[in-house]
Image (cartoon, helix red, strand yellow):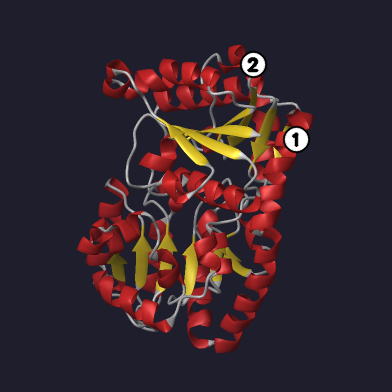
Amino acid sequence: MKIGYDGKRAFQNKTGLGNYIRSLMAILTEQYPQHRYTLFAPKQTDLFNVHTFKNVDAVFPETFIGKTFPGWWRRNGMIKSIAKSGLDIYHGVSNELPLHIERTGVKTVVTVHDIIFERFPETYNFDERYVHRWKIKQACKVADAVIAISKQTKNDLINFYHVPENKIFISYQSCNPIFQQTISNEEKAIVKKRYQLPDTYFLFVSSIAPRKNLIAVCKALLLLKEKTSIPLVVIGNGKKEKEEVKQFMQANNISDRLVLLNELPASKEISFTTAADFPAIYQQALALIYPSIFEGFGAPLLEALWSGLPVISSNTSSLPEVGGDAALYFAPTDYELLAQHMLSIAVNKQLATDLRNKGFEQAQLFTIKKYADSIMNVYHQII
């Protein structure tokens, strides 16, 4: 088969949906090398190099107008490229399909990650909600198959948009294979020095936004102020919310317990922007803390399970689907229970060991092969 993909975020997003499509390409090309994969993207960057794969191509704007106005190309020019490419399937991996793609005769799949804007509309502008809603409803209407990344997302699509249940396939993602590799002590030492990592630390991996709930960890750190001085290392960036977190830490005289890696010069290096250094950062942490209020899946949680890292997670949305019984859970506003979990892992080595062992077992539900097979199964359903 020749399969095309929306490649915009592979080249432009450093986290989240960018990691999703980059990981998907790595996994599919490894598990199904007999197929040909083509990314359609408005701009080429250093975030993804198709030349590292024998069977991956990329299509970018060729005309002056397309190069000058990438948004126009994605809405108009890209559909012409798709029509000429001889694809068997086009897969929109980030909640949308190109307008009028049904006219090309190419079979289509759309992956919907979440519709969080429907559950938390106050965190989105009206225009954002309208655009997101229109794109997802339109894509689900014209697509031959819809992939939901969790039961939570499938149920939301049925309940909010009345998407036919028989059209939706659940495909649990795996994570980038680099998180399944054991990093050598030498490499860990290099990464530790590069990012000035503390000897012991908790880890938070996510954008710094209200829904991601970093402030919950900060409030737990305040409760633990007299009991432990273990800091929190943060991989992720933000604007208003990040400043609010920094002000909270400063006001309570615990700003030394917050390490924001995105503010370090090393965060500009390609090994950080492509997440190549992340496995070494994960594998040196005491535990991952994932306090999100709502997630369609929660990839960092799975990355932690594969990394042998104990997980403390909020008990909402899809997160228990991913963590199973391999995580300690708390309600997103239960800072006291979160603090208790953090302290327990810090002082109870047996608990940490048990969580690591359970985490590895839980991760087997999300192997690369299972992920690739589930995606290919959807493709074969519509060909």
Q: Tell me if 353 is positioned left or right of 286 in this view.
A: right
Q: Is residue 324 above or below residue 171?
A: below
| Quarter where residue 41 is shown | top left
Residue placed at 34% from the left, 80% from the top? 189
In depth, the one of 6 and 328 nearer the eye is 6
Instruction: Give the amino acid type for the residue marked by disc 2 in the picture.
Output: Gly
Using the image as rendered, state which of residue 330 and residue 182 is in the foreground.
182
Q: Position of residue 217 (x, y in %)?
A: 42, 64
Q: Is residue 198 left or right of residue 383?
A: left
| Residue 171 figure quarter | top right
- Mark 1 residue element: helix
* Residue 222 on image: x %, y %: 36, 71
- Which of disc 2 and disc 1 is earlier in sequence? 2
The amino acid at mark 1 is His
How many other residues sit within 10 Å of disc 2, few (<14), some (14-19) or many (≥20)?
A: few
The x and y percentages for residue 235 are 36, 60
- Examine the rendered structure and indicate whether residue 241 appears above or below residue 63: below
Local packing at callout 1 (Cα closer than 10 Å; few below 14, some 14-19, many 20+) is few
- The residue labelled by disc 2 is 105
For the point 65% across and 20% down, the residue is 141
Give the x, y percent position of residue 305: 58, 67
Disc number placed over residue 2 in the picture, else none: none
| Quadrant where the image shows the N terminus | top right
Residue 17 visible in this rendered orientation of the protein: yes
User: Dividing the image into 4 quarters, which one contains the C terminus?
Assistant: top right
Q: Dot 1 corresponds to which residue?
A: 380
Q: Are marks 1 and 2 in contact (CB under 8 Å)?
A: no
- Decide which of 230, 103 is in the foreground and name it: 103
